[in-house]
Amino acid sequence: MIAYIGIGANLGDPRANVEEALIRLSALPATALLARSSLWKTAPIDSSGDDYINAVACIDTALAAPALLEAIRAIELAHGRERPYRNAPRTLDLDILLYGDVRIDTPDLSVPHPRMHQRAFVLAPLCEIAPNLVIAGVGAAAALLPLVADQAIERLD
C-alpha cells in the first residue's frame, strides 16, 4: 500500500527530529521509503511556540493502517512526544495523510487526513514529491496550493 506520512516538529532539535523520523519510517517492517520531500519551515497554525520543520514521506508498506498508526506513534514516543493538549508544541508529529485510496473514519484514525488540504505545510511538500496526486473526495493537491497561499512557508533544502 502506498501511504503518505506528514512529519513535523518544533521542540528540541526539530530538523534532526524530522530527519530521524524519515530514517525510522524507512526501517519499519515490510515498509520502504519511496520518496521524501525537502524540509519546510512554517509558523505554527492553531498552535504556539517556535516555527515548525515539516516534511512528507511516501512509503510502500504491507502494514495495515492500524498497525502503521501504532508504528508511527511509537516513533513519536521515542522522540519524547507528549500530548498535554490539542495542537501543543511537539518534538515530533507524524500523521497518516493518505493510505492508498482507502477512506478511514475511526475514533483513532481519519484518512485522508481531514485538514491536510487546508495546510500549506502538508500541501507544499506533498506536491513536491507527488505533483499529480489527487486527494480522494477533495481534488488535485496542486490545485489546492493557491488556497493556502496566505500561509507562510519556506523550503529549506
Image: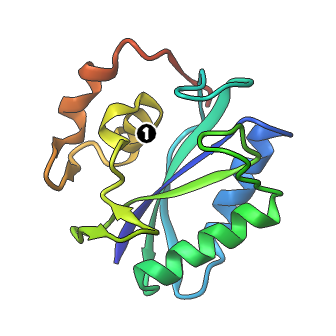
Residue sitting farthest toward the top: 150
Q: Position of residue 121 (x, y in %)?
A: 48, 33
- Residue 102: x, y in percent? 24, 71
Report the colour scheme: rainbow
Q: Secondary structure at mark 1?
A: helix
- Rendered location of residue 81, percent (x, y): 76, 55
Residue at left offset 30%, top offset 67%: 105
Crowd tier of the residue under label 1, counting other residues whose Cα lies within 10 Å: few below 14, some 14–19, many 20 or above: many
For the N terminus, give its image quadrant.
bottom left
Judging depth in this view, the residue of 21 and 115 nearest the camera is 115
Nearer to me, 19 or 64: 64
Q: Is residue 58 above or below residue 14?
A: below
**Residue 142 versus residue 28 in the image, above or below:** above
Q: Where is residue 46 drawn, in percent x and y?
A: 53, 28
Q: Work out whether 74 lies above or below 55.
A: below
Above/below status of 39 relative to 7: above
Count the marks: how many? 1
Residue drawn where x is 69% and y is 48% of the image = 18
Residue toward you, 66 or 101: 66
Looking at the rendered structure, the kind of residue marked 1 is Val
Q: Quadrant of the C terminus?
A: top right
The residue sitting at 65% across, 31% down in the picture is 52
Which residue is pictured at 71% across the width and 61% down the height? 76
Residue holding disc 1: 122
Instruction: Residue 51: name its quadrant.
Output: top right
